[in-house]
Structure formats: C-alpha cells, structure tokens
C-alpha cells in the first residue's frame, strides 16, 4: 500500500488496483476550494491502467459540506471567489468552470469504477462529488443536498446530468429547485444510493463492494461498465451493436486470438 499527499488537502492511497482519494480537511467538514478541484483533476490525469476502482471519501464526520465559505465572497479581488468569477468575461468564466468540472468528470473514466463512501453531510459540491461517482454507499446518517438555486446559483460541477440519470427528470428537478436534503433512506429508495449501512459498517461495506467488483476478470469488468454507461445515451439499436462488438472482443480474448 502506498500513500501520497497532493495539493488542496486531498490525500491518495493506493492498494493494488484500488485507489482511495480522501478529502482531508476534517476541521472544515471537507469544504472544497478551487485547489481541491485542481488536485482531484490531477489525480484523474495520473491514473494508470492498473487502477480498476477509485474510492472517494471524506475524512472526519462529513463527506463534504460543499464550498469553502471564503468562496462566497462577492469581492472580485478574492481569488477563486464567486465575485472573481462574476467579474470575468463570460467565456473566461466558463473556461474556469470547465477546469473545475474536470475534477469531477474523470470519476466516470473508461477503465475504472468509482465508489463514493458518504457519511454525514454531502452538500453542494460535496453532493456533486458523490454523484460524479458510479456507485454510492451511504451511512444511515448521511444526506445529500443541492442548495445552489436558493443561493442564486446553479449546480455546475457535473451534478445535474448524473442526478437526472439516477432519479429521473421530475425528481431531479424538485431536488435541485427546493434544495432540500435527501436522507439515506430516500436515497436508497430512489437509486441515489446503492447501499445504506450503519456508520460503523461503512468501511466494511465499501471493502466488500470493491472486492466484488475486482473479482471479475479485468477485461470483462471494463467492457461491462462501458456498456452500462453507453446504455444511458444509446438507442436500442446502437446499444445492441455495442453489446455485439464487446462480446466479440471478449470471445476473441478468451480464445486467445
């Protein structure tokens, strides 16, 4: 097992094919900053082909309470703050946000399966980080909330697409517009969570899920994940073709050709 620190209070630990990424600001409930998103993007860019599973965690009692309070400054001179973004020309502001989104979108990269281990609060950017992952394991006290609309903003860290995929249009719209908290029981019932466990059981549940994922041969696992992801956007004919192509590759590999 190897460990490393990266900027933005993000810590990574590697154990074979499993990379664990930990938000490590427990004294700030793992509040996020542009440095956090840059660090996450750096982790994604550094992945090698041997990584099969990425586990995303938050140190301490909360997964992530969202944006660091300093970012809510309307002063254009505050680096990374909302005021600085708002004062930029639209194209520049959008390019800056694109760089922030890069810290999230890689969690659905081909070749890996990402798992969010969520305890306590996952608010705003924290909820969107959990949503960016393929799978979510929540503790019984966990809740997710997207309060951006109530603050005059929108969820802009890739959260709207993944939320809608998971719970459907009308429920996603209601969750985003009301900004209400979605508790663990509701998350499980609506497909936001894959499992809900007691707080003391989070590590064991995540470890069991990771073991089950990595038990399958790597080629079959990656092809299957790619098929499920493409099913969200493909029409039936295109998806059938993708299945045929993937199975042909698997059969050829098993036959040694």
Image (cartoon, rainbow, N blue to C red):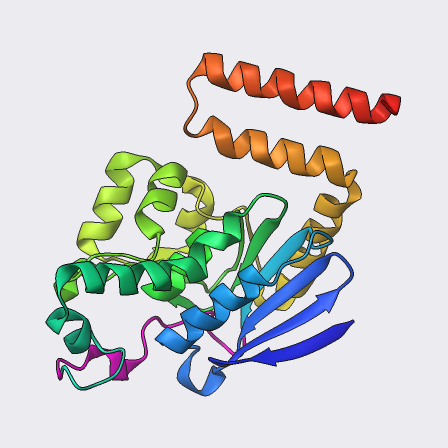
Q: Give the farthest residue toward the right.
A: 256
Q: Residue 150 in the image: state x and y as whole percent.
A: 15, 62
Residue at 63% over, 19% down: 245
The quarter of the picture where the N terminus appears is: bottom right
Residue at 48% over, 17% down: 238
Q: Residue 192 in the image: state x and y as whole percent.
A: 44, 46
The quarter of the picture where the C terminus appears is: top right
Between 224 and 207, which is closer to the camera in this rendering?
224
Q: Residue 7 in the image: state x and y as whole percent.
A: 50, 81
Q: Is residue 76 left or right of residue 48?
A: left
Q: Is residue 150 left or right of residue 155?
A: left
Q: Residue 68 in the image: state x and y as whole percent.
A: 32, 79
Q: Is residue 70 magenta?
A: yes
| Magenta stretch bounds | 59-75
Quadrant for residue 205, please give it: bottom right
Q: Give the farthest residue toward the top.
A: 237
Q: Is residue 137 visible?
A: yes
Q: Is residue 182 left or right of residue 142?
A: left
Residue at 72% over, 23% down: 249
């Amino acid at each position: 097992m190897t460990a490393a620190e990266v900027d933005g209070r993000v810590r990574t630990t590697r154990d074979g094919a499993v990379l664990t990424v930990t938000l490590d600001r427990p004294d700030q409930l793992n509040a996020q900053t542009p440095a956090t998103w840059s660090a996450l993007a750096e982790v994604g860019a550094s992945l090698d082909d041997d990584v099969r599973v990425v586990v995303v965690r938050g140190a301490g009692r909360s997964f992530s309470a969202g944006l660091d309070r300093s970012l809510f400054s309307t002063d254009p001179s505050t680096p990374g703050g909302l005021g600085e973004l708002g004062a930029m020309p639209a194209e520049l502001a959008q390019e800056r946000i694109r760089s922030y989104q890069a810290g999230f979108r890689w969690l659905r990269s081909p070749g890996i399966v990402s798992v969010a281990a969520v305890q306590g609060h996952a608010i705003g950017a924290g909820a969107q980080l959990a949503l960016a992952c393929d799978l979510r394991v929540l503790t019984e006290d966990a809740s997710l909330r997207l309060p951006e609309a109530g603050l005059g903003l929108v969820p802009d860290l890739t959260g709207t697409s993944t939320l809608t995929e998971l719970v459907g249009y009308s429920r996603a719209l209601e969750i985003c517009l009301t900004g209400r908290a979605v508790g663990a029981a509701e998350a499980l019932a609506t497909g936001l969570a894959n499992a809900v466990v007691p707080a003391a059981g989070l590590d064991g549940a995540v470890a069991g899920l990771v073991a089950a994922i990595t038990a399958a041969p790597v080629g079959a696992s990656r092809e299957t994940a790619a098929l499920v992801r493409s099913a969200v956007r493909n029409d039936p004919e295109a998806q059938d073709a993708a299945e045929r192509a993937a199975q042909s590759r698997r059969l050829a590999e098993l036959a040694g050709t």
